[in-house]
Image: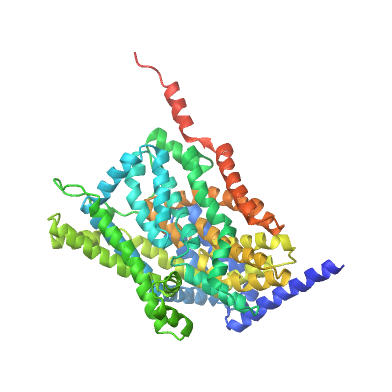
């Protein structure tokens, strides 16, 4: 009886926290969630289902946004007026998404990086790197491992990761008959997962701020960065998906749709399926270097190095100015007395406007690439500008999709979709199961909304107070915080309407729905391992230093025993082939 009473009290406390938070924000999302109920799931469901059926992301996202704006405008039986107002609101959403400085910076960054890749290709830098890597990447296994390592090295931002690694490695993986689906998966699985746990990245500031505010909600003033670092061992999905890539590359074993895609590539030499519509336009072609140009990897290393170094310098400079213009005396004193310390760099990175900085660094890298090409007489100034514009055109479709995805996210937020999901999933929760439930809730919300940031922002203020109410043990609260951060990344990672999923398809020139379908099997498999061999054991009190190595071992065993050798079909084909006399 006492246990039941405790569960009831904690459940009431959770609901009170939810309601208090909703009214404190003064957001109509709570009212809409109560008004529309299950209908709040309609926009993401329309987008996701149509994306799988039609394989047309633009159409699916457009209808998803329109279904949401229609719900927000329906009143009585006046359907025609609601449709008219829904269209007007749809246009308004697109405009407001483009007007947002962060979103505009992301689109401009994408376009600028597209132009940079075009310039690097025109100078022969991409081909030189491909040929250089091809010497080391002599097998499909080594090529996948090199792609994986490059993805880990570009740890500072998930957008930059998706747009840099894919185009560089695509010629290498194509030559070694690795499917575009596998390339897109490796790129996608080393984007947000590594950026989310990197000690310094564009994600850290946001994650730390959420942790700090959530702990303040329970009356604790903590070292938020220290808590963030403590969550890393509990970020099971991030760590396991990274290890999963390495295991599939080492064992050359796949399962599900990816096995079919890889065997198609090896046997038939088709890196894309017959009906694939790769996310790259005609403007991305015709960028081969002129005949007689001496190939050099420095024609790629220098511009891309400028992009990466410029991004790091920009993060510090932008964040430094933001902090010095603020009112936090402690941070101002830190940057004044020890500007080059690790803490100062971390705080500056966290306070920077990542989208603006990445656009600035990409633009500067483009200028450097133009100067290099013109000085080496690889192209004239006019040709350089034309090439740059041509490269940007190849990413216009990405900008369109991102605008639609952001518009859908805005509609979903106003409808209160995430709040509805949270309310129906938050019930009486046993202590050991809370981390798993938080992970699953984060996964569902981020998959449906396509945003990890939004999911973190919704769940963190709820999860930490609830975890503390169930058990004030510090490690227990930390693992629940880690479950929020990792669950948000899992759902966002495999969602077809996620911006990083879209960018990974774009960078790898892969059919978006083929990428989503092949990746989904792997993501869900790792999520299951995360819950069964990760959050449930640590929830039961088993130390994380025991659980994490065991979960990694289980991941390796799953790849080896569930997966089937890709090359097996190739060998069978050779054996069955008639011998010519």
Residue 505 seen in the figure? yes
Toward which corner of the image does residue 561 lie, by quadrant?
top right
Q: Position of residue 98 (x, y in %)?
A: 38, 73
Toward which corner of the image does residue 423 lie, by quadrant?
bottom right
Which residue is drawn at the image coordinates 61% and 83% (left, top)? 24
Q: Quadrant of the N terminus?
A: bottom right
**Closer to the camera in the image, 228 or 371:** 228
**For residue 334, side relative to residue 424 (left or right):** left
Q: Quadrant of the C terminus?
A: top left
Q: How many marks?
A: 0
Q: Position of residue 33 (x, y in %)?
A: 62, 74
Instruction: Tell which residue pokes out farthest to the top in this image.
Output: 581
**Closer to the camera in the image, 580 or 55:** 580
Which residue is drawn at the image coordinates 36% and 75% (left, top)? 318
Q: Position of residue 270 (x, y in %)?
A: 38, 39
**For residue 464, side relative to residue 196 (left or right):** right
**Closer to the camera in the image, 44 or 357:** 357
Q: Position of residue 273 (x, y in %)?
A: 41, 42
* Above or below, comparing residue 250 to residue 23 in the picture: above
Residue 272 seen in the figure? no
């Amino acid at each position: 009886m006492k246990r039941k009473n405790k569960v009831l009290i904690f459940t009431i406390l959770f609901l009170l926290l939810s309601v208090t938070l909703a009214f404190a924000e003064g957001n109509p999302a709570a009212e809409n969630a109560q008004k529309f109920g299950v209908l709040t799931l309609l926009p993401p469901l329309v987008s996701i289902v149509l994306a799988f059926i039609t394989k047309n992301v633009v159409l699916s996202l457009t209808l998803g946004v329109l279904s949401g704006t229609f719900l927000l405008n329906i009143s009585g039986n006046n359907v025609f007026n609601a449709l008219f107002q829904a269209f007007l609101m749809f246009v308004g959403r697109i405009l407001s998404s483009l007007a947002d400085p962060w979103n505009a910076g992301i689109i401009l960054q994408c376009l600028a990086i597209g132009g940079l890749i075009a310039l690097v290709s025109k100078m022969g830098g991409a081909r030189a790197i491909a040929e250089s890597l091809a010497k080391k990447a002599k097998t499909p296994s080594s090529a996948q491992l090199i792609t994986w390592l490059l993805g880990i090295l570009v740890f500072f931002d998930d957008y930059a990761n998706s747009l840099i690694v894919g185009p560089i490695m695509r010629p290498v993986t194509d030559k070694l008959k690795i499917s575009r689906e596998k390339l897109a998966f490796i790129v996608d699985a080393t984007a947000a997962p590594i950026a989310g746990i990197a000690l310094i990245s564009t994600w850290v500031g946001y994650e730390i701020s959420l942790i700090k505010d959530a702990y303040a909600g329970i009356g604790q003033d903590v070292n938020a960065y220290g808590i963030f670092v403590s969550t890393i061992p509990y970020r099971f999905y991030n760590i396991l998906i990274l290890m999963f890539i390495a295991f599939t590359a080492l064992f050359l074993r796949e399962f599900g749709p990816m096995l079919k895609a890889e065997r198609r590539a090896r046997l038939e030499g088709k890196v894309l399926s017959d009906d694939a519509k790769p996310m790259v336009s005609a403007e991305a072609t015709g960028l081969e270097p002129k005949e007689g140009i001496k190939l050099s990897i420095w024609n790629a290393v220098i511009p891309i190095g400028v992009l990466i170094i410029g991004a790091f310098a920009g993060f510090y400079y932008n964040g430094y100015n933001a902090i010095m213009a603020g009112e936090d005396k402690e941070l101002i004193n830190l940057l004044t007395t020890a500007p080059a310390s690790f803490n100062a760099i971390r705080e500056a990175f966290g306070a920077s406007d990542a989208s603006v900085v990445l656009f600035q660094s990409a633009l500067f890298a483009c200028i450097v690439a133009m100067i290099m090409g013109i000085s080496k007489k690889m192209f004239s100034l006019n040709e350089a500008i034309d090439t740059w514009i041509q490269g940007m055109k190849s990413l216009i479709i990405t900008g369109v999709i991102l605008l639609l995805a952001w518009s859908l996210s805005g509609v979903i937020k106003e409808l209160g979709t995430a709040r509805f999901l949270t309310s129906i999933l938050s019930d009486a929760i046993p202590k050991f199961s809370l981390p798993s439930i938080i992970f699953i809730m984060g996964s569902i919300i981020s998959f449906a909304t396509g945003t990890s940031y939004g999911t973190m922002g919704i769940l963190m203020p709820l999860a930490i107070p609830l975890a503390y109410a169930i058990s004030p043990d510090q490690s227990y609260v930390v693992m629940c915080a880690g479950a929020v951060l990792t669950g948000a990344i899992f759902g966002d990672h495999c969602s077809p309407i996620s911006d990083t999923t879209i960018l990974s398809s774009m960078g790898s020139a892969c059919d978006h729905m083929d990428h989503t379908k092949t990746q989904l099997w792997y993501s869900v498999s790792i999520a299951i391992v995360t819950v069964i061999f990760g959050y449930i054991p640590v929830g039961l009190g088993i130390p994380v230093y025991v659980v994490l190595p065991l979960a990694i071992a289980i991941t390796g065993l799953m790849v080896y025993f569930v997966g089937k050798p890709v090359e097996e079909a190739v060998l069978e084909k050779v054996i069955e082939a008639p011998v010519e006399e």
